[in-house]
Amino acid sequence: MNAIDTLITLAQVRGSLDLRCQFQGDWALDHAPEVEGVAPYHVVLEGQCRIELPGGRQLKLAAGDIVVLPGGFEHVVTSPGERVASGLPVISNGGLLPIKRFGEGAELDLLCGRFLYQPGALLFSALPDHLLISSQALNEGDPLRALVALLRSEAEANRAGGQFMVNALTSALFTLVLRAHLEQSPQSEGSLALLSDRRLGRAWQAMLQDPAHDWTVEALAELASMSRATFMRAFSKLAGRSPWALLTQVRMQLAYGLLSRSQSGLSDIAAQVGYQSQAAFSKVFKDTYGMAPGQLRRSLDAGA
């Protein structure tokens, strides 16, 4: 498993395709902010639109473009023409997806959904507030194009098992969007930038592969073929954080997943993520998530 696979797995990313929008004329549609752990996305099948982000920023989207908002910010999707007041679309059901409509035609045809992930996921905190994948930057045979075409086909056909199929496909959609983003926008800082650094990347990938290991500065610096001082300085400058801060976040993510998916005892989970003391593990976990491990498990069980 490579580092990106590990980060996606730690984040427990899964997807859903929720609705289709077919709009005509001038229109605007508000989207409220999402709770942590939800990243909305829009896929333009036909037509053009704009997305207004906080701070007055605007994104222009055309057919084939995909936008993801990792932070779940509020936003407004609008027609490309004159800005009008936001309205309430008509919603029709009966197919695989509910369809929101402004007007009778479909100048804009849009698929909308959400990527769900573990709150506090390192991968999502390393991403910008929006990912815009332009169809113009994709090769004709790019798998992302093929996947969008398959999503459209499933959404239109409404065959048996269609909802399960599109939700499974959206998990793959996230991976392909992330891959395209990293190819189109190389990272210059942050935890993802470490993966592109020939020497620091070796140390970071080793930490991701075995976060429970009792890592030392000497061992990490040796992996990076650097002195202790040079390693710490270079790692912290590129990542914006120390190796121990990132390692702690990875360990806490791993613990969160174990608490939500297994019945292992707290002492066992503490050991699995690199802590010899359950008390020390519980303190760091509470500092990270605002509640003790046992409280989190009970809250997850209650919400199941």
Image (cartoon, rainbow, N blue to C red):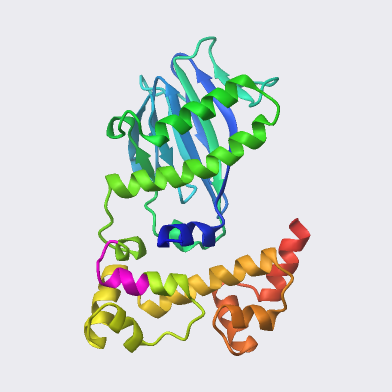
Magenta stretch encompasses residue 49: no
Q: Residue at x 52, y 74 (%)?
A: 251
What span is colored magenta in the figure? 196-204
Foreground: 137 or 62?
Answer: 137
Compared with residue 168, is residue 121 higher up or lower down, i.e. above or below?
Answer: below
Q: In the visual, does 171 lie left or right of 55?
A: right
Q: Residue at x 44, y 59 (%)?
A: 123
Residue 146 visible in rendering: yes
Residue 32 visible in rendering: no
Rendering coords of residue 242 (x, y %): 35, 77
Compared with residue 58, is residue 195 higher up or lower down, i.e. above or below?
Answer: below
Compared with residue 25, is residue 304 higher up or lower down, i.e. above or below?
Answer: below
Q: Residue at x 65, y 30 (%)?
A: 162
Q: Residue at x 56, y 85 (%)?
A: 275
| Image quadrant containing the C terminus | bottom right
Rendering coords of residue 210 (x, y %): 48, 75
Q: Quadrant of residue 284?
A: bottom right
Residue with the most extreme right position = 302
Rendering coords of residue 224 (x, y %): 27, 77
Foreground: 253 or 298?
Answer: 253
Rendering coords of residue 94 (x, y %): 70, 20
Q: In the visual, does 210 lie left or right of 300?
A: left
Total tally of numbered discs in the picture: 0
Q: Quadrant of residue 220?
A: bottom left
Q: In the visual, does 282 lie left or right of 21?
A: right
